Structures are given as C-alpha cells and as structure tokens.
Image: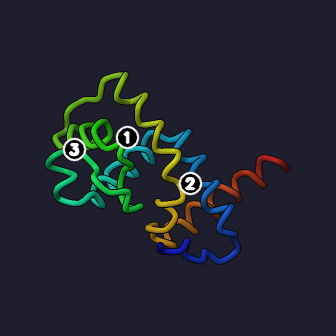
Amino acid sequence: MRRIPKVPGYTADQIVSFIRMKLIVSPIWRRRALLRLYSAQTPSEKINRIAIDENLVGFSKVDTPVLSRIAEDLQRGTPLSKWQTYRMFRLEKYAGQLARIADTQKLKRSMDKFFNKLCEAKV
C-alpha cells in the first residue's frame, strides 16, 4: 500500500484529518474527491459499477454502485439530486486514500492557507 506523502510541517494524521474536514465542509472538495476516486476504479468496475476485489483503490464494494453513478452524472454535467448530494458524504471515509494520491504541493498550500486564517482568527 502506498504511504501518505510527507508534507513539510504536517504529520500524516494532520493531513488525513484536514482532508476529512474539507470533505465534510466543502462541496467542491467532495466533487473533486469523487471524480479522483472514480478515475482510480478499474475499467471493469466503471462499466459494471461493481467492485469485485477490495484493492484499496477507488471505491469499496458497498460504495461502488452508488458513488460510480454519481461520478458519471457529474461527468455528464447532470445536476445532482438531494439524495446524491447527501450520499457524497460517504467520501469522508476515503480521506486516507485521498491523502496517499494527493498532490503534496497543492495540499501544503491549502493547509497553510487554512491554518494561517485560523491563526489570524484567534488573534
């Protein structure tokens, strides 16, 4: 299994917690995460919307049918229903996987920006 990359100034737990928090509060992060995880699905999983193996890449067996359909709708530009939007909150559990495939430079910038604003708010 691929390890969480080092992001200067942050521990692996802080990285995963940050991603989890962003998935909870940001619809943009949820959409990007969903499409990134969908791109990691095998061609067979995409076509059949069924995960045969737990390969720790993409969606779990339970989530594949639902999240694959939502990702396909997003790719087509179809507006999501309230139910689909609600189901995207399942992505929180993929924070560790997303941390392993993240662009570390972009992640560091995002974390720095967030924590700098947080520190300014405390002052």
Residue furthest to the top in view is: 82
Q: Which residue is depicted at the point 50% across and 41% down?
A: 26
Q: Residues within 10 Å of mark 1 (few under 14, many from 20)?
A: few
Q: Residues within 10 Å of mark 3 (few under 14, many from 20)?
A: many
Q: Which residue is depicted at the point 47% across and 36% down?
A: 89
Front residue of this view, candidates 8 and 62: 62
N-term mark: 2 or 1: 2
**Residue holding disc 3:** 49
**Residue holding disc 2:** 19
Front residue of this view, candidates 83 and 118: 83
Specify the quadrant of the image occupied by residue 78: top left
Point out the frontmost of discs 2 and 3.
Answer: 3
Is disc 2 placed on a helix, strand or loop? helix
Is disc 3 placed on a helix, strand or loop? loop
Front residue of this view, candidates 38 and 106: 38
Identify which amino acid the numbered label 3 is placed on: Arg
Residue 81 coordinates in the image, percent (x, y): 31, 23
**Residue holding disc 1:** 62
Which color scheme did the rendering employ for the protein?
rainbow
Circle number at residue 41 = none
Is 42 displayed left or right of 60 in the figure? Answer: left
Identify which amino acid the numbered label 2 is placed on: Ile
Residue 31 coordinates in the image, percent (x, y): 37, 45
As drawn, 43 above or below 5: above
Q: Residues within 10 Å of mark 2 (few under 14, many from 20)?
A: many
